[in-house]
Amino acid sequence: MNMLWEKIELFLYLALVIELSVSAILSIKFLDQLLQSTLTKSIKNLLVILISFGVVWNMKNLRLFAGSTIEVSHAIDFLLSALFLARLANILHDLFALLKERAKRDL
């Protein structure tokens, strides 16, 4: 079970890197105005999912249940790992947006 927590911590760090990378690219002033639409938010989410799948695909040892006592097929483990990473990145995005909103409100 300790290995599972270590992997979740690694996923959290990777999600932070993915979120900061995508947010840095999309925070360019020209693109900032475009991000207000639903379509561009969907494109951002798709980008995060694709990057998550790519990271999990290239890092073979980055599987959520690999090495744990929970037995699942490799395909399910790959899918769950990539979606978990993407969801963590989206949670971090929402957290950063909330903190930014509160900071603006407190000023």
Image (cartoon, helix red, strand yellow):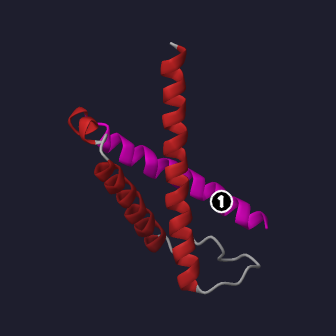
Any part of residue 61 in sight: no
Q: Residue at x 40, y 68 (%)?
A: 54
User: Can residue 105 be seen in this snapshot?
Assistant: yes
Q: In the displayed structure, does residue 57 sit left or right of residue 33?
A: right
Residue under the image location 48 percent in, 20 percent down? 104
Please provide percent x and percent y for residue 20: 43, 44
Say which quarter of the image contains residue 95.
top right
Q: Taken as a whole, is the magenta stretch helix, strand or loop? A: helix
Q: Is residue 53 left or right of residue 75?
A: left
Residue 15 falls within the magenta-colored stretch: yes
Q: Is residue 62 magenta?
A: no
Q: Is residue 27 above or below residue 78?
A: above
Find the magenta span and give its range.
1-28
Q: Is residue 9 left or right of residue 41?
A: right
Q: Nearer the viewer, residue 79 or 18?
A: 79
Determine whether the residue tagged by mark 1 lies in a helix, strand or loop.
Answer: helix
Q: Nearer the viewer, residue 2 or 34?
A: 34
**Mark 1 Cα within 10 Å, few/some/many (few <14, many 20+)?**
some
